[in-house]
Amino acid sequence: KSKEAPFVVQFAKYGFCGVVATLSHTAAAWWFSQHWFPAFDGAPKEILKWNQIYANLWALPIGNLVAYVTNVVWVFTGGRHSRWKEFGLFSLINVVSGVAGILGGPFLRDDLHTGWWIAQLMLIVTSALVNFICRKFFVFQK
């Protein structure tokens, strides 16, 4: 339970928090894809691709907030920066990796002829590794 855990344990805890944040983000993106930006079958591919991007952009702050709270409570020790700067850096890293994944997933969806869920999985894998490394070494103390 300690934040002073060995690297492997810390990464596992980070992974669990990431799963919770990812589920939050994906649930929100799915909801936005159902209600605000239809991104499932039935429309031209170009519209589906952009609607998936819009839905994920709206879901990004939700997943970010869940990720920040769970990481602060359970994984990393703060103190390198003020709480506001810490949250700002955390969010900046999330936005950069998230936007890269959000843009990459749906465009690959087009190129690889995959569905919504495969594109979403590509987004998740892309951003998870970048987020951990940047947060561990640039945002938090330990």
Image (spheres, rainbow, N blue to C red):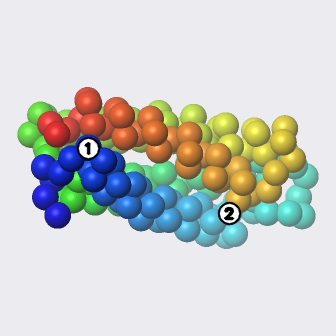
With 133 as the anchor, is 82 left or right in this view? left
Q: Is residue 64 visible?
A: yes
Dot 2 or dot 1: first in sequence order is 1
The percent position of residue 41, horizontal first and vertical second, equals 86, 63
The percent position of residue 58, horizontal first and vertical second, equals 53, 54
Q: State the quadrant of the N terminus.
A: bottom left
Image quarter of residue 29: bottom right
Q: How many marks?
A: 2
With 32 as the anchor, is 77 left or right in this view? left
Q: State the quadrant of the C terminus.
A: top left
In this view of the protein, which residue sits in the foreground, 69 or 57?
69
Q: Identify residue type, mark 2.
A: Ser
Q: Which residue is mark 1?
A: 7
Q: Which residue is mark 2?
A: 33
Position of residue 70 relative to residue 57, above or below, is below
Residue at the spot x=47%, y=44% of the render?
A: 128
Instruction: Give the class, few, some or many, for how many residues have Cα within 10 Å of label 2's Cα (few <14, many ≥20).
Output: many
Position of residue 21 relative to residue 83, above or below, is below
